Structure formats: C-alpha cells, structure tokens
Image (cartoon, helix red, strand yellow):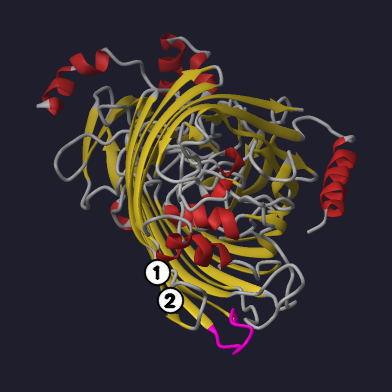
Amino acid sequence: MRLAIWANGRDSERRQPVMRAAIYKKFRWSAWIALTWLGLGPGGSLGHAGDLIVAIADRAGKPVPEVAITAAALAPRPGARAPMPEPAIMDQRNLAFVPQLLVVGVGAEVQFPNNDSVSHQVYSFSPAKRFQLPLYKGAQHRPVNFDKAGLVVLGCNIHDQMVGYIYVTDAGYYGKSDAQGILHLSNLPAGDYTLTWWSPYIADAPEKMTRTIHVAEHEPVNIQVHLNRELRARPEPGARQTDWSY
Amino acid sequence: MSRLGACAVLSGLLWIGSASAQDRLDVTGEADVRWVSASGAPSYLNGGEGLLRFDPEHEDLRLGYLFLDARLRLTDSLSAHVIADAYGDHDRNVVDLSEAYLQWRPFPTNAIRWSAKAGAFFMPVSLENRGPGWTDVYTITPSALNTWIGEEFRTIGTEFEARWLGASQGYLGDVALIGAIYGWNEPAGELLADRGFGLTDRPSTLFGGIGEPPEEAYHQVDRRPGYYGGLTWRHHDWLELRALRYDNRADPYAETTTAYAWHTRFSSVGARLEPTEHWTFIAQYLDGTTTTAADIVTESLFVMNYRTAFALASFKQHRERFTVRFDDFQTHQVSGYYGLPPNELGHAWTLGWMHDFGHGWTTAAEWIRATSVFPPRVEYAESDGLIESQLQLAVRYRIHASL
C-alpha cells in the first residue's frame, strides 16, 4: 500500500529531497537539470536524472529506521569528480553518541562536540580511521577528517557503554532511512547502481545487503528491501543508570 | 595503615592538582542527613549485637554521610581517584579515606584494552554500589552481601583488567578478565564471625575503624599477598554478569600484637538485568569459608562457612525510584572453637523510595526489617533471636565541580 502511495508521488512530495553534497544546494533546479542534461552532474552517469526511493522493512514488514543506504554508479562518467562532502557533527549527549549512526562521504570533516557534563575520550581503531580524541569540557577540538571509505566504530575510553558508528562512503549518493524506513535520493543520473544498506542492528549476511538497481530517466524508482533475518535487539531509548565514572 | 600514608596521598594530589588545567580535576560531593526510627537491639556499630546501622538509642536526626569523590586527570591515560568520607559515628578519624588509587587506562588500539589500578579501592563485586562515593543507587542500604564487601574488603594492591571491546567486532557488549594481588586484608572474616552479616551503608575507611570500640579493618599480618580473579560480561546495555573468586591466602596461624590473620576465600556471582529503561533486576550470591587459629591452647583451626544472596527489583519512572529487596544470609561453624557457635541464620526485607528534586537535591526513604538468629548473642541478650526494623528518611544534596 505504501509503495502505491509513493508511486502517486503524494508521500514523496511531503519530504524534502535528501541531497548530501553541498554543491547541490548551490544550484537551483533549472541549473541542476541543465547540468545533468549536459552530463556534468556529480557521480555523473550517462542519462538524465531520476529519483530513487528506498524503503527498508524487517521480516514482519515493519519499517527499519536509521539504516545507512548508499547508491554507487556502476559506470561513472570518466573524469567525474565526487562532490565535496558536507561537514557533519557527531555529538555526545547523555553518555551517548548522537546520532548513533552518521553517514558521510569520503573526505568529510566531522566535529565532535561534547555536550555532556562529564569528559569523554572518543577513539576508533577501525581500519578506515584510527584516532583518539580526548573531549574534555571547555576544550576546543579540530574536526576529524574521514579520508577512507569504510565503517568507523566509535567508543569512549571512559564510558564503555557508548558506541557510535560513522559510515564513510565513496558512493555518490547516500543517506539514512527515516522513521518510516524510507530514504529519498533525488536527481540520480540514469544508469545502473549498486545499492547497499547497513545498520548495526541488521543481522543479514553482508552479501545479502546489496543489490544492483537501475535508475531510469524522469521517473522515480521505488526499491523495497526486505531483511532476511530478525533485527538484533535495539537498546531501549532513554538514559539508564551507569556505573559512576568521571 | 598509617596516617602518614593518608597525608602522603593527599599531599601528592594537591601538588599535582596545583598544575591544574582545563577539566583536570573533577569533584563530586554529597551530604546526607537523616531522620531515623529504629527498633530492636543496639547496633554493632554502637557496641551492640544488632545488624542494622541505627538503633533505638541512635534515632531521630543523624548524619548519613558526607563524601567527596575526586578524580584528578594526570595525563590522558593516568588519573588519580580519592574518596574522602565522614559518618559521624565512633570512627576515630572524623574524616577518612575509603579509596585512594591511581588508574591507568590507555586508549585502546585494538579490541583488547588493558587497564590497571594501584592503591586502595573496592573490588568489583557489588552491582548495587554504582554511585559516586560507592553509594547504592537503588536504596539507602546495600544488601548484606555488599555491606560485608564494604566493611571488610579493600584491594590494597594492584588490579589488572583485559577487556575485549565487542563493538569493534560487531557485538554490542564486552567481556573483561580481572585479576588482582593485594595485602592488608588478612583480618577479613573476623567481623563475620563476631557478628554475622549486617545491613548498613557504613563501609570501613582505610585508616579508621568501624564499631565501638572502632577496629581497624586493614592490617598486614603475614606478608602473604592475596589474589582475586574475575570475569565480567556485559551484553548490550541491559545485562551484566559477574563472577569472582577471592582468596586472601592468609596464614591462619599468623598474628601481630593488634590483629589475627583469617584465611578467607569465597566465590561470588551476580547478574543485573535492565530489560527496559524503567526496570532493574539484580541478584548476587556469595559462598565461602574463613579459617583462623582462634584457640591459642590447642591451636586447632576454627573453620566457618558462610553464604548470602539477595534479589532486588527496582522501578524508575521520571524522578521516582521504587525498590524492593530480599536478603538471605547464614554462617555455619564447621570445626574448631570460637566461643558459642557463630551460626547465623537470617533474612531481611528492604523497601526503598527515592525522589530526585533536581538541582542536586534528592530524598530517599527506606524501611528494613531483619530477622536473625545468632547464638553468641545470649552472652549479651536474653535470646539469640532478633527482629529489627529501621525506617530512614534521608535528604541529600550533591555538588559537582570541574576545574
């Protein structure tokens, strides 16, 4: 039923198009259409622009929010350069990373403010990015540059229960599913794409979390993803008692 | 332990703290004042045979505690921690320390993170005492099990931890192996033989003593280090399991002019389940043996077994917390002579309520009813059986500062 609503366009009209590249915002629709018609759009492919709407649902058909979704052109136009990714923020609030999952493009600068009343020591030893960032209150920190695609798992050396994820992608189009489990990507050049999705709560095998799709000209493409396995247990929302630390 | 040691620790911290920089010193302090109503026998803290903290002779307005819990960051990996506290009872030091240690915890560079503590600190048994100053976050008085841990045990030595950080491997949880070697714990077990298990929020301090007359808890008697080893498993943020094996390896025949050695060993397991943000369930079990050469004539060994367990359920909604707990405890003489057999058999019910007013103000109310039988009581009372109850209403104010 939901798919039918999207096809009519009513649901998608209520949503803002999700454009992750800063350059997109600088162009009006007319200029954007002209550029893509000329084949100069970011991630440039062969044809005209189309919309991609991805809906993620679990085995019971319930929408799955906060899923990282990327679309990478299978045959990017030679010489096409990926747009500069937007700077992003990974906050610390109530002894948690906010958001828990951040999706950024390769080369993104990520700020790590500390809005808690206690100190944090953020670290990652993931191959995609190794860093150590002591976040003492009142101290200023330079943003961290994520220059390699891959999953970066964040931890706090003081509060072991804090876990966060930065999904760094070199795909041209990306975002996260919303509360309805939907991500709307606009103005993808027509062509074939590798669609990939990931969340720490999805238990499917990695090879099951990708598929090839085709984006056609001037018409939205609706992709419905049904997960194969039960989701891993998601922590209950709300702050819990944690052992005293500094 | 000498007062010289306390002075050295405090002086060192002040000296290091003089070079304070941004967010280097973190201090939390709390004052707890209570209205108390109690029935039963005089508390063992006042020289009696009662198991609770207060008694009919020590009612009405009382100091619950004052504490300062301070952390000084020396480097990103090294910090110094101190808990200074006061209880307003017979302790010969008005203010004393219950913890003073250095902690080394470097940033992890792979899935195993090593860390270490050196100094004097509580061992990782209690699943209730999660607050600053080793306070119970569920009700005023910890269980009989954790009361005893606070009274007779302090790791005065070094503890190492190797923690597998599961998040990096796709598992939301971690597993930690813990090991420690320590000294100054040879007298541990004597209070249990003298009194049995008790229920108070009055842990011992490092340099003072508890009871009337106050007895120091920490002595070096035989210079044989003890050990404990433990395992902790945290699954997501809603389940924590702990197991620990403790053995102070004391020579039961050793003694000094001020203390006897008690060879005390036990196994402890515990689980905390938080299925939702509102509910917490905790269960802990401890089972062990203590041995000492109490009979100086025959030098036969006095051996006593003990075990205790409790189950706790706590519900938190907005600013309110409600807790109910059942404690069961017993001690049993196996052999030897230590006066009348210290065979304690008892249980206790605890009901607690806490309300957070915000801005540092909280209030807590607690009712405990403890029923116990302890044969040595007949030396002081008409019966070895005792039913005690205690109602406490505490007002607390907490401060927190970072310099």
What residue sits right under mark 1 in the picture?
B343
Q: Secondary structure at mark 2?
A: strand
Range drawn in magenta: B293-301
> How far across and down, in percent of the image, does residue B386 sit?
36, 52
What kind of residue is marked 2? Gln
| Residue B269 quadrant | bottom left
Which quarter of the rendering shows the N terminus of chain B?
A: bottom right
Q: Is residue A161 left or right of residue B343?
A: right
> Magenta stretch: residue B296 in it?
yes
Q: Is residue B287 above or below residue A218?
A: below
Chain of the residue displaying label 2:
B
What kind of residue is marked 1? Asn
| Residue B294 quadrant | bottom right
Task: Spot the residue most to the left.
Answer: A1
* Spatial separation of the CA atoms under disc 2 and disc 1: 6 Å
> Magenta stretch: residue B353 in it?
no
Chain of the residue displaying label 1:
B
Residue A104 - label: none
Q: Is residue B69 above or below residue A139?
A: below
Same chain for labels 2 and 1? Say yes or no: yes
Mark 2 or mark 1: name the one nearer the start of the chain.
2
| Residue B400 quadrant | top right
